[in-house]
Every structure is written in structure tokens, then in C-alpha cells.
Image: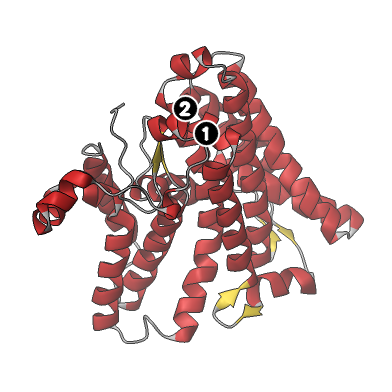
Amino acid sequence: MSSTPSTTGPASATATSAITTPGTDPLDGAAPDTDSTADGGSGSRSRFRDLSFWAEWAALVGLAILVIVFQSSNSTFLSTGNIEAMLVSAAILIVLAVGQTFVITTGGIDLSVASTMTFGAVAFGLTYEHSGQLWLSCIVAVVAGAVIGVVNGLLISVGGITDFIATLGTLSAASGLALILANGSPITIVNSTLLNLASGGFGIFGYSFIIAAVVAIIGHVVYFRTRFGTHVLATGGSSEAAAATGVRTKRVKLAVYIISGSLAGLGAILLVSRVGAAEPAANTAFLLNSVAAVVLGGVSLIGGRGSVIGPVLGALLLTALTNGLTLVGVSEFYQPLSVGIVVVLAALLSRFQK
């Protein structure tokens, strides 16, 4: 870790800044850089030449470029209907990306998010099928996701298994459980309130996107304004150093996986409302895109640095990319390739983060 934290990106923070100024939110601003002020315009020019600057702002710059390119190619890209559709499509990914952000900030990774969401969806479907109670089904879905998160957290923090192996195991286990419980068949759910969740809203902001936005805001506050957020950044920066200062790093690890699992359960509710059924087959695209959104958002894959706003912008960028490619007539077979290229470029830029 560098001793000089950078806060140039969209509300980014480092482990160093978290320890020295607990709860500091970069959106509140920072003291001016006296060196760059003295240099006048040369400071700004050197910043634009710095690749770490572009790593911080990759999602926002990329999103702006996509908007210009796709709107120039197809005037319906920025139509009210298409913007609303993109925001609704991005909702699930935003929710998953917020959970993944907390995990990756600690230096881990949750490979089980897609399977956890599928497991939560099946739990939702079975509960509704037997009880007919929507509120109970929602609670069960979130709890089901949290349970997978607890398993992940215990395997990693107590069992000493690496994040990659532990979550790879639960990925398979949760997916298998979902298939067994649903007998391999979708569970159709007919509910007007659930349908309204997917199709209703205020203007261009659908209810599902509003829920995702609330999750992102809460995540941002927790990340920057609470002691827990400080501990998350510190644990990712250096687990040993954090433990030496009194941070209970094992509890932090357990907590971030519970957060990720719970949000995957919430994502399951949004997914069921969108498709009208609990599908027992996991959609691995959500796993890949949740990690991609975090990388695009400038969160360090080795931990100790990140933000919540960045991954949200990353999720919007990925959604805009797939939507725009569809509008301009690019085959869906090429879309994963384009997403992969964007993510690799973002990962390369992240190597230059200070």
C-alpha cells in the first residue's frame, strides 16, 4: 500500500485514509494539493497524463463514451423508454456489486453470488408456493442468501480456507441445492405486487432501480461513515496491521460475506419479479459482471481501496454496453467478448492505481 492515498476517483478511499481519518467521505472534499496549486495548470495536465487518474475514473469516462457512441449510432438509445429499461436491467447488478465491493475491499472475492441468488430465488418460490405470503417469501430469500454468506465467512475466517476455494465450493453447493429443491424446474409465481415491482415506478425510475439506489446509498454511508467501513478498508490494506490496532479482522471477513449473501438474496427477489418465476439454473453472467463492475469502479482487487459509487457506475456501464450493442444490431454472441475486453482494460488500468 502506498502512504499517499488518492481520492481523485468517484468517492474512493484507501486503507491508509480510513485509518488516519476514520469515517472520512471523499464526497465531502479534501484539502487542496499545495504542489499542484502552485504549479497552476501544469498540475491538472500532469494528472490527466497519470494512468492512475484514468483507473479511478474508468467507469464514468467509459459510460460517457458509450452514451456518445451509441446515441450517435441509434437515436433511441437515450429515449425515455430505453433509459428506463436500462436502469431496471442494471438494478440486480448494482445490488450484487455493492455486496461484492465490501468483499473485494477486504482482499477477498465472492464467486458464489450468482448461485446464492439462484438459491434465494428458489427459497422465495417454494415459500410463496406453500404460504402465499409475499412478505414471508422476501424474508426467506434474504435469509437464505445470508446463510450462504455465513457459510462462506466461516470457511474463510475460521476454517482458514482461501476465499477463492471456499466460494467456489459454495457456488457449486448452492447451485446444486437450488436444483434439488426445485426438482430442476422453474417455480412460476403470479403476484400483482411482484409484477408491479418489476414494471412500476416513478417516471424513468422503476421500483427495482429505486431499491438498488437505496442499497447503494446505504452501502456508501456504511463504507465511509461507520467504524465498520473503516475496519473493512483496514483489513484489506493489511490484515496483520489492522489486527495489531485492535480490528477483529475475522469478524470483518465474516460480516462482509454475510452482506454479500444477503444482497444476493435481495437480488433474487428482484430477479423473480422480473422473470415471473424462480429459475433453479444459476446465471453465471451475474457473477462475472458483479466482479467486472467492481473492477471498472476502481476497487483494488488486492483490497484496501475502493468506493461504492464506482462499482455502481461500473454496473451502469456494463448494462449500457450490452443494451447499446443490441440496439446497433451486434449479435448477442459478441457481447460477452466486448464485456471481457472492457474488463481486461480496466484491470490493466487498475495496476497503475497509487
Amino acid type indicated by mark 1: Thr
Which residue position is annotated with label 2?
234
Callout 1: helix, strand or loop? Answer: helix
Amino acid type indicated by mark 2: Ala
Residue at the farthest right position: 131
Q: Is residue 244 left or right of residue 323?
A: right
Q: Is residue 127 above or below residue 276?
A: above
Q: What's the image's color scheme?
A: secondary structure
Task: Tell me whether circle 1 and circle 2 mark residues in contact (CB < 8 Å).
Answer: yes
**Residue at figure coordinates x 47%, y 47% from the top left:** 25
Which residue position is annotated with label 1?
230
What's the distance in space between the residues labelled 1 and 2, CA to CA?
Answer: 6 Å
Q: Residue 294: where, in percent of width, then height?
A: 41, 46
Mark 2 nearby-residue class (10 Å; few <14, some 14–19, many ≥20)? many
Q: Residue 33: where, in percent of width, then height?
A: 24, 46
Q: Residue 272: where, in percent of width, then height?
A: 67, 60
Callout 2: helix, strand or loop? Answer: helix
Q: In terms of depth relative to the viewer, which is nearer, 35 or 169? A: 35
